[in-house]
Each structure stands twice: as C-alpha cells, then as structure tokens.
Image: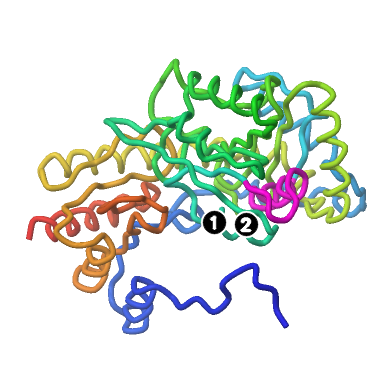
Amino acid sequence: MFSTRLPWDAPSNRLSQALARRRQAGAEILDLTESNPTRAGIAYAPEILTALADARALLYEPAPAGLEPARAAVAAYYAARGRAVDPARIVLTASTSEAYALLFKLLADPGDEALVPRPSYPLFEYLAALESVRLRQYPLFYQQAWFLDAHALEASLTARARAIIVVSPNNPTGSFLKQRELEHLIGICARHDLALIADEVFSDYALGPDPARVATLAGCDEALTFSLSGLSKIAGLPQMKLSWMVVGGPPELRRRALERLELIADTYLSVAAPVQHALPLLLEYGELVRGQIAARVRSNLQALAALCREQPACELLTVEGGWYAILRVPRTRSEEEWALELIERDGVLVQPGFFFDFDAEAYLVLSLLTPPDSFRVGVERLLRRLKE
C-alpha cells in the first residue's frame, strides 16, 4: 500500500552497523564526519534568539515568494558581494532540499531527468526519487585539481533531460565552477533547452582567490538559472530553516518561471514568519559564525596537509573551498574496509568515497568542521593505521 519511490527496506550499511555497536558499548568515537555547526563547538551570539522575538511574527501574511523585507535582506547579502539582485527574482524556501523539490516540480514531469555531478552530494538521489525524477550523472575528473568535462556531460544527455545541476563549491570535492566551464554549460543549455541549477551553499568558504572562479550564478541571464543558498551554511544556522533561490534568464522565460514557482510555493507556504522577519539580523550575526567556521576549516586543512606530508602513502587532494577534504589512500583494501578498521580499531569515523559516488577506490572523506583537537588526534590515528 506504499509508494515505490524510495527503497524503504534497504538495510543499513556495514559502517553504520559498526558505529552503532561502538556507541552502544560506550566506546570513544572521534567523529571526523561532523558537518553540523551547532554541534561543532561554534559560538553563537545570544542576540540570534532575540531576533526571533519580533512582534510582526504574530501576523499571518501569506507571501508565496517570501516577505518583501526578507527578500530585500537576501538581495543585500548579494550586494555586499558585488552582485546586484532584484528582490523580485528571489523565492524563499525552508531549505535547499525544498528548493530542489520545487524546481523538480517546475521543470520536470515524472520520468524526466536531471543531470548531477559525480562525485557529489548523496541526497540528490532521494530528492529526485520523491519527485519521480530520474538522475543521470556526469563525471568530475581529477588531475591535480577537479574539473568538469563538458563533452562528457553533453554526451550523457537524453531527450528527457530538463536541467543540469552544478554544486559550487562541490560537496565533497571542494571544487568551484570556472568561467570557461560556465560558458560551456550555457551553450549546452541553449542547444538542448535546459535549465541550470547552481547549488552555492558553500560559496562563502573559498580557501583562496581565483580569477577563473564563478562566484555565483545569481544575475546570470544567458540561460534559465536558479542559484541556491541559505542560512544553513552561510550563517551556520541549519535549524532556522530558511533558504532561497535567485532566478535568472531571458526576461520572458524568467517571468514564466517565477509565476509558476509562486504558484507551487503558494501551495505549501512553508517558510515561517519569525525567521523571515529575523533574517536581516540572522545574516548580520551569521557573519561572526561564518568567520569562526572559515577559521576552523583553514586551520584543520593546514594541520591535515602538514600531517599528510609525513605520510607518503596518503595523498590530500586539492580543495578550493567548502568544509571537506578528501584523502586518497592505498588500494591495499577497499575504502569500506579502511573505514571499518578505523572505527572498530581506532575509534575514528570517516566516510568512504562511495558514499559520494566516487567511481574508483580508495578515497576517504573528512569534515574540516571537526573540533581541532579531535581532528588532529583522529587524523594522527588514521595515518598510523595507513602506515601499519
């Protein structure tokens, strides 16, 4: 009597089982996968709670695209980064996951397809399946840095393709979309009548300057584009449940997209009034949180690089931004076996590359958001295990 959209009865994987056993035994766990800033020792200003006590939140104002002051606050966020965005192009959502759901409803019929990068965020499969949309993967290649192969992407298109998704910087590779890659993507979208969706939630966490980098697609009008971001990453506030998309494209196409998005959003009206009224202050206080996160990421990455230089069997792949780092480890065993041995024998939790659809062995993914002391001890144990 239930739908077949998801594999409801799929068993837990071996790593999850090993982790559960260790937790049940009360044994030590050094979690190098922690990606929740509210559990990573980040300090939050108490004024964040005060910002939610706005009396205007007691008034119900159903605004499908979001309240005007909240959308103006998002526009100000982009203006501070040198990008002029009309608030009328902004649609608020409760999360980027919901933004994907709205966009799949807007762009695709059941059985239509969206292209996603590989490796990348593992939740895409579930988000698409819940909307009866199929995913096709296009590869990211690594040669001292990650890059997108536009020819391989275009070769994977079928007649049912409706959108291309890019994640910039990518989770977990940390690679930004480059200007030349964007030019190729715009050409592909024009030739095949596709929309371009850019997930930019980690865009404020660049690890260095790069003139070839695409900072954001917000305001890009060469193709129908949707730029996604939100409080979860840029302000370290996933619990506040507010994200947005900026719609770009040729005027008539953009107008039609916005009209349809408002109709879809009006069906749910999911973004709560208190967080919308608090948004200007949440973005302001979020700068302090973002600064702490950026410092944590840089510090952990520097420590990781220094430790990896002492262990030639382990290669730290180039990372340009975001919260994650990737280690290429010896293929003397599978990455699943490496991850299992680390949790069972060393109490160190890492993610194997296949969680992110890496197409080869053997990669381990670490969160750079981990508290520094735990991170260093965990990495030292990991490297000792590799050496043994």
Q: Which corner quadrant of the image does residue 16 belong to?
A: bottom left
Which mark is on residue 292? none
Nearest the viewer among 385 and 39 is: 385
Report the amino acid beneath label 1: Leu
Describe residue 185's horizontal placement relative to residue 276 as left or right.
Answer: left
Nearest the viewer among 378 and 53 is: 378
- To which residue does mark 1 refer? 123
Q: Disc 1 and disc 2: Cα gap in Å?
A: 6 Å
Describe residue 387's horizontal placement relative to residue 11 as left or right.
Answer: left
Q: Quadrant of the N terminus?
A: bottom right
- To which residue does mark 2 refer? 127
- Residues in magenta, as a range: 93-113
Nearest the viewer among 260 and 21 is: 260
Instruction: Give the percent coordinates (x, y) of residue 326.
Output: 31, 46
User: Regarding mark 1 in the picture, which secondary structure is present there?
Assistant: loop
- Residue at figure coordinates x 20%, y 42% from the top left: 315
Report the amino acid beneath label 2: Leu
- Residue at figure coordinates x 36%, y 36% from the top left: 141
Instruction: Give the percent coordinates (x, y) of residue 227.
Output: 65, 34
Q: Are marks 1 and 2 in contact (CB under 8 Å)?
A: yes
State the residue lying farthest toward the front. Answer: 159
Q: Which corner quadrant of the image does residue 84 belong to?
A: top right
- Residue at figure coordinates x 34%, y 81% from the top left: 21
Q: Within the magenta stretch, is there residue 236?
A: no
User: Regarding mark 2 in the picture, which secondary structure is present there?
Assistant: helix
Nearest the viewer among 180 and 68 is: 180
Label 1 environment density (alpha carbons within 10 Å; few <14, some 14–19, many ≥20) = few
Instruction: Give the percent coordinates (x, y) of residue 298.
Output: 35, 37
Label 2 environment density (alpha carbons within 10 Å; few <14, some 14–19, many ≥20) = some
Q: Count the labels in the image.
A: 2
Instruction: Give the percent coordinates (x, y) of residue 137.
Output: 50, 46
- Residue at figure coordinates x 29%, y 53% from the top left: 364
